[in-house]
Amino acid sequence: MFFLTVSREKEEALKKRMEALGIFESDIIEKFIRSGGHGGQKVNKTATCVYLKHVPTEVEVKCQRERSQAVNRYIARRILADKIENMIEGRESEERKRIEKIRRQKRKRSQRAKKKMLEEKRKQSQKKKERREIPDPNEY
């Protein structure tokens, strides 16, 4: 496993992590597919998208983040290792937590919460009005 644009240290660290999780290159089916989207003619002509399938666990990964096939191979293996690690440890993935947090932030407020927020805004506005300088009647 050698990736042209990924440093030797990162490659070795990933290799050790995969071995520790029991992921072997012989258990992985790797295919290259033409990417789509950003990257223009380059990605439309070359097969830079990487598809991996770990046969024992049936985990599948598809990666087309970068224009380089070598970098996509590295990223795909890293994602595969993350998924299998989450399966083994049985914990919720960091990615899933991040997605859920964003969904909660974007979710529409309930009527009660909206009413409470608007009431707080009105109170704040009232405070600011009361802080305003009162014009001196003798100045006119």
Image (spheres, rainbow, N blue to C red):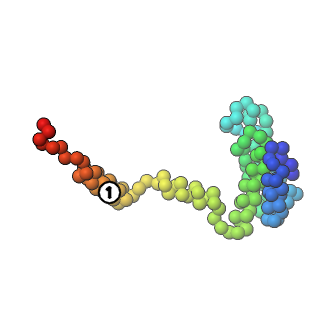
State how many labels appear. Answer: 1
Identity of the residue drawn at 49% across and 55% down: 105
Residue extending farthest to the top is: 41
> What kind of element bears circle 1?
helix
Instruction: Report whether residue 61 is seen.
Output: yes
Identity of the residue drawn at 33% across and 59% down: 116
Q: Residues within 10 Å of mark 1 (few under 14, many from 20)?
A: few
Quadrant of residue 95 within the rendered picture: bottom right
Quadrant of residue 84 within the rendered picture: bottom right
Identity of the residue drawn at 19% across and 46% down: 134
Q: Is residue 97 left or right of residue 24?
A: left
Residue bearing mark 1: 120
Query: Could you say which is closer to the camera, residue 1 or residue 122?
Result: 122
Q: Is residue 94 left or right of residue 28?
A: left
Q: What residue type is disc 1 on? A: Glu
Quadrant of residue 112 within the rendered picture: bottom left
If the image is split into quadrants, where does the C terminus sit?
Answer: top left
Residue 31, x across and y down, in percent: 81, 47
Residue extending farthest to the front is: 138
Instruction: Report whether residue 122 is seen.
Output: no
Residue 104, x across and y down, in percent: 50, 57
Residue 103, x across and y down, in percent: 52, 55
Identity of the residue drawn at 58% across and 55% down: 99
Residue 46, x across and y down, in percent: 79, 36
